[in-house]
Amino acid sequence: MSTFLVTWNPDKYPWDFQGRPPAAIRQTAAGRRYKGGWSTGGRKSGITPGQDRVFMLRQGSEPRGIVASGWFTSPVCQGPHWDRTPGKLANYADVSWDVVLGDHDVMPLALLKLKIAGVHWEPKSGGVLLASPADNDLERLWAVHMAEDSASPHI
């Protein structure tokens, strides 16, 4: 299993061009997966569907940090660019999101920087492979964050 970071900057590019879907937050809070695709940045290969983990890093204005987790369900493929530039392509992979959080539940960037050394937590694009032990450290920190957050709704 490999673990990857994908990025999202809502200041520039709303998720689904309508903001983060409330349905994704509600669905995953109810224990159901939310299916969708996401850009893998410059990554064109190296993702194993059904085995590789993905975390979404919210960038831009606050709150910044991890806002979602899931599993890749397809290899990387190319499609029309998400910024809708005619003729421009981007790399994508399908994802089954198991957690999508609202802004008030984001795992803060400051915490990631404090607890998991050796990772550039402000990458220019997604598709970043986390090396060991950072991948395992992120899983443990995420599990603690989700346990602490489980008492509050995800909306």
Image: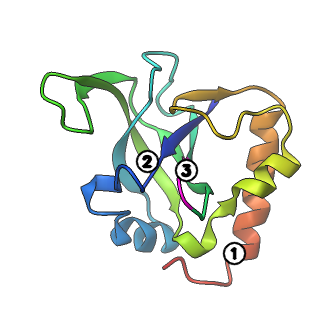
Residue 51: image x %, image y %? Answer: 56, 31
Mark 1, residues whose alpha carbon is within 10 Å: few (<14), some, or many (≥20)?
some
Query: In whole angstroms, how far apart are the C-alphas of marks 1 and 2?
Result: 21 Å
Pick the front one: 33 or 4: 4
Q: Main secondary structure of the magenta part?
A: loop
Q: Determine the residue positioned at 51% across, 72% down.
A: 29
Q: Which residue is mark 2?
A: 96
Separation of marks 1 and 3 at Cα, in angstroms = 21 Å
* Residue picked out by circle 1: 149
Q: Secondary structure at mark 2?
A: strand
Q: Which residue position is annotated with label 3?
A: 59
Q: Check contact, mark 1 vs mark 3: CB within 8 A.
A: no
Image quadrant where residue 81 sits = top left
Which residue appears at 34% of the width and 55% of the height?
A: 14
- Answer with left or right where residue 31 lies relative to residue 121: left
CA gap between label 2 and label 3 equals: 21 Å
Among numbered discs 2 and 3, the one appearing first in the sequence: 3
Query: Viewer-proximal residue, 15 or 83?
Result: 83
Say if the magenta span includes residue 122: no
Query: Which range of residues does the magenta coloring cover?
Result: 57-61
- Residue 97 is situated, as x and y percent measured from the top left of the image, at 47, 52
Check the image and report above or below for 124 versus 29: above
Going from N to C along the chain, the mark reached first, 1 or 2, is: 2
| Between marks 1 and 2 in the image, the one whose residue lies nearer the viewer | 1
- 10 Å crowding of disc 3: few (<14), some (14-19), many (20+): many
